[in-house]
Amino acid sequence: MESQYPHVVSPSRLHRTALTCTPECPRTGSRGNPGQLSVPDPPPAAVVQSSATETGAHAGGVGGRPKLQVQGVHINFGGVKALQGVSLDLLDREILAIIGPNGAGKTTLINSVSGVYHPSPGRIVLDGENITYHSPARIAALGVARTFQNVALFKGMTVLENLLVGRHLHMRSGALASGLYWQLAQREEIRHRAVVERLIDFLEITHIRNALAGTLPYGLQKRVELGRALAMEPRVLLLDEPMAGMNMEEKEDMARFILDVNDEWGFPTILIEHDMGVVMDISNRVVVLDHGEKIAEGSPGHVRGDPLVISAYLGEEAAA
């Protein structure tokens, strides 16, 4: 299937060269000057993606011990079986797409990972730690960040302020400490603002940094929501239909940003997306859900040709 997004650099089509950076020589490139957040960059070799993705082997730099494990997860809503024994692993530096028809259980799975729902039975494991029954706040504090199908910004706050909300888990100065140690709190705020300013530059939203989030076009609101999730410096990034409702140009931009985030920081990412052009172009692996069950898993090329997936979701035309 020919890509619908010819300007999006696909990990399955060519090797992506790592951007190297030193403190004296900040990054530059198509996404501005992201520099670093406050985490060290991976070695450049870990960023190169192998064309083996299309044949089913994991791309170069993707692998090792799973960052996130979903083990036999069941979620029931009364008599409705939303998830039935779903298992998957998310590897380090991987973009794992989850696809399937409406009602397949995709968002329910993300809600289980982020602590909104608690599976019974089943387990969610983050870096070897069982987080199955943790609260959403606790799971966020452990480094699981997410976006939502419907934009969930603070619409009366500016873009800058919305991104600063994503830094609150890293803030150490409470109200009392801020009053007693004003200079310490001020220095901390400066550090967090510096991180946010790098993200604003990286996401090319400098021109709207002081605009109220609720006044922005839909596509820019989705980009700001991505920035807020990135501001958390997540160990795992969950993107729930980040391109829903976008036009073609906005989708191309968001797809590039997701790839650039993976290049720059390597956050392992679960992506729920209905646009198969995007899924085939930017994901390392694909998991397919239907009626709460996992019916297929593999490389984009493998899944695209799976007869069960074609019958349940893609259709003959999409698979051609």
Image (spheres, rainbow, N blue to C red):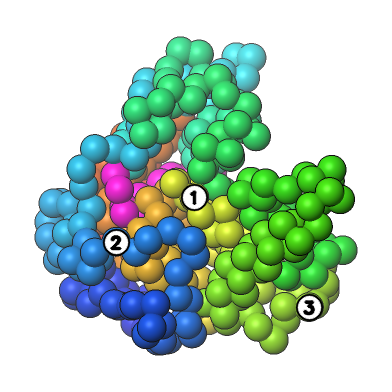
The residue tagged 3 is 210
Provide residue 253's location: percent of width, then percent of height.
50, 77
Gap between marks 2 and 1 measured at Cα = 15 Å
Looking at the picture, which amino acid does disc 1 mark? Pro
Residue beneath the point at 38% across and 51% down: 268
Is 186 located above or below residue 17 in the figure? above
Gap between marks 3 and 1 measured at Cα = 25 Å
Provide residue 159's location: percent of width, then percent of height.
73, 70
Residue beneath the point at 26% across and 74% down: 18
In the rendered view of the protein, which quadrant contains the C terminus? bottom left
Is 81 located above or below residue 306 in the figure? above
Residue beneath the point at 81% across and 57% down: 182
Is 180 located above or below residue 231 in the figure? above
The residue tagged 2 is 42
Of 195 and 61, nearer the camera is 195
Q: Is residue 54 visible?
A: no
Corner quadrant of residue 206: bottom right
Mark 2 or 3: in front is 2
Which of the marked residues, 2 or 3, is nearer the chain's N terminus?
A: 2
Gap between marks 2 and 3 measured at Cα = 32 Å
Segment colored magenta = 91-102
Residue beneath the point at 49% across and 25% down: 131
Q: Is residue 134 left or right of residue 49?
A: right
Provide residue 110's location: percent of width, then percent of height.
52, 38
Looking at the picture, which amino acid does disc 3 mark? Asn
Q: Is residue 268 left or right of residue 115?
A: left
The residue tagged 1 is 234
Q: What is the crowding at mark 2: few (fewer than 14 residues within 10 Å), some, or many (at least 20)?
A: some
